[in-house]
Amino acid sequence: MKSTLLLSLVTLLLSSACATKALATCPTGDKAPVNASVQPASLKGGESANLEVLNMHCGRCTAKVRKALREDFKFEEVKVDLDSKRASLSCPAAQKSCDLGAAIQALNDLGYATKRL
């Protein structure tokens, strides 16, 4: 009985997308290196941008990036693609501007090396 329960628990853990490779490699909050030569500007209302977001390894990573861009920085039409390591977003037309530089820095602070494309 104990071995069956243990086997079930191990199987459950190994079947999780983040329990194998991804959990060990997901950013832990360490700051990612920032390319100092890239100085992203703010976006005007209605403008959009594309970002390269490295160090994403699983659905939890993309959810964290999406949440930060949508909820913390109020971007619209946020799309984050794990396979291409890209994100697209737009500044709401009703807003005067959005601070893209602060959003990129926040993602870097979360451990996702991010730059504007």
Image (cartoon, helix red, strand yellow):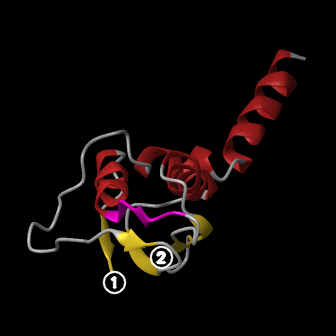
Q: Amino acid at mark 2?
A: Arg
What kind of residue is marked 1? Leu
Q: Which tag, 1 or 2, sits closer to the chain's start?
A: 2
Instruction: Examine the rendered structure and indicate whether residue 69 appears above or below residue 7.
Output: below
Task: Look at the numbered disc 2 and give the secondary structure of its residue.
Answer: strand
Numbered disc total: 2
- The picture places residue 79, in percent across and down from the top left corner, at 61, 71
Report how far apart the C-alphas of labels 1 and 2 lie in the structure.
Answer: 9 Å
Residue at point 39%, 47% (across, down): 27
Q: Which residue is mark 1?
A: 117
On the rendered structure, is 80 left or right of 12?
A: left
For the residue pair 72 and 51, the one nearer the viewer reads as: 72
For residue 36, side relative to residue 105 (left or right): left
Q: Are marks 1 and 2 in contact (CB under 8 Å)?
A: yes
As drawn, which residue projects farthest toward the right? 1
In the depicted view, which residue is nearer to us: 48 or 38? 48
From the top left corner, tell me how far across and down residue 115 is, in percent.
29, 71
Say which residue label 2 marks. Answer: 86
The answer to which image quadrant residue 55 occupies is: bottom left
**Residue at (40, 75) in percent of width and height:** 51
Q: Secondary structure at mark 1?
A: loop
Q: Which residues are magenta?
A: 95-100
Image quarter hosting the C terminus: bottom left
Q: Nearer the viewer, mark 1 or mark 2?
A: 1
Name the quarter where the N terminus is drawn.
top right
State left or right for residue 45 relative to residue 29: right
Question: Is residue 98 highlighted in magenta?
Answer: yes
Local crowd at mark 1 within 10 Å, few (<14), some, or many (≥20)? few
Residue drawn at 39 percent across, 72 percent down: 43
Question: Where is residue 52, by image quadrant?
Answer: bottom left
Q: Is residue 99 above or below residue 93?
A: above
The residue that appears at 30% across and 46% down in the rendered structure is 109
